[in-house]
Amino acid sequence: MAYLNRYYWFLWVAQAVSSVGDSIASLFMGWIVYNMTGSQVAMGNLYIAFVIPEIVVRILGSPLVDRVDRRYLMFCMDFVRFVAFATLTSIVLLGKLQLWYLYAIAIIGEASAALFYPSGIAVLSSIVHSKEMVRANSILQSSLQGAQLLGAALAGVLLSFAGAASGFGINALTFAISALCYNSPASVCWCTQPNRLPP
């Protein structure tokens, strides 16, 4: 099938791995906020920190997705999230975690995701033939939903056996893996030549 090429699978791996990490991190952050405060208001504030930045950035950042090199944009968003969650992991390990750190990381993570995921969907037209577009997009979207469920299951296991830092560290690792997918030599051609479909 036309869409089953290495370019498509680079995109698939990057999106799926990032989605697993996002799911783990969001559940960890909610659990930590509740355990730190026991407050429903604090939980609501975390939800706002997740939702509002994504809405605002998706609205304001949509033109950016069409105007810049999508490979570079997705790499940058992964790098930003890698640094954010690697920093959060270090803070947790050092025992210096404060509530506002979680809100700040939630804002940074969701704002970055609001540019990352639309860029991934938009780049499909560069690597998939039009007759396979619906099927390829369906597989990608289904995989992302499955990745979120997998992340939720892993989060429960990690919370039980490995502690809070493990989830944030794994999330940072998923963003590093995703960034490598977009920065590998094999992926460069479809990102830098958006009108060139793979054979």
Image (cartoon, rainbow, N blue to C red):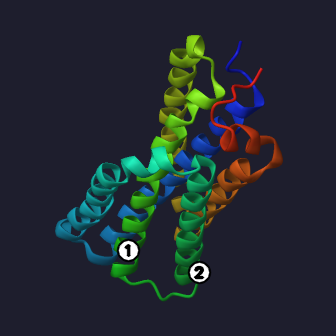
Closer to the camera in the image, 107 or 30: 107
**Secondary structure category for the residue under label 1:** helix
The residue at 55%/16% (across/down) is: 135
Nearer-the-camera pick, 178 or 28? 178
Task: Report the Cα–Cα distance between label 2 and label 1.
Answer: 15 Å
- Count of marks placed on residues: 2
Residue at x 63% of width, y 49% of height: 71
Horizontal side, residue 191 vs residue 5: left or right:
left
Mark closer to the observer (2, 1): 1
Q: Amino acid at mark 1?
A: Ala
As helix, strand or loop, the secondary structure at mark 2 comes to helix
Name the image quarter holding residue 42: bottom left
Residue 78 visible in the snapshot: yes
Q: Amino acid at mark 2?
A: Ser
Position of residue 126 in the picture relative to residue 41 (left or right): right
Characterize the local packing of mark 1: few (<14), some (14-19) or many (20 or more) Cα atoms within 10 angstroms.
some
> Where does the image place residue 47, in percent across and percent down from the top left?
27, 59
Up the image or down, 29 lies above or below 191; here it is below
Q: Read off the residue under disc 1.
A: 104
* Residue, disc 2: 90
Whether residue 161 is visible: no
Reading the chain from its start, which is encountered first: label 2 or label 1? 2
Q: Image point 68% across, 59% down: which residue?
A: 176
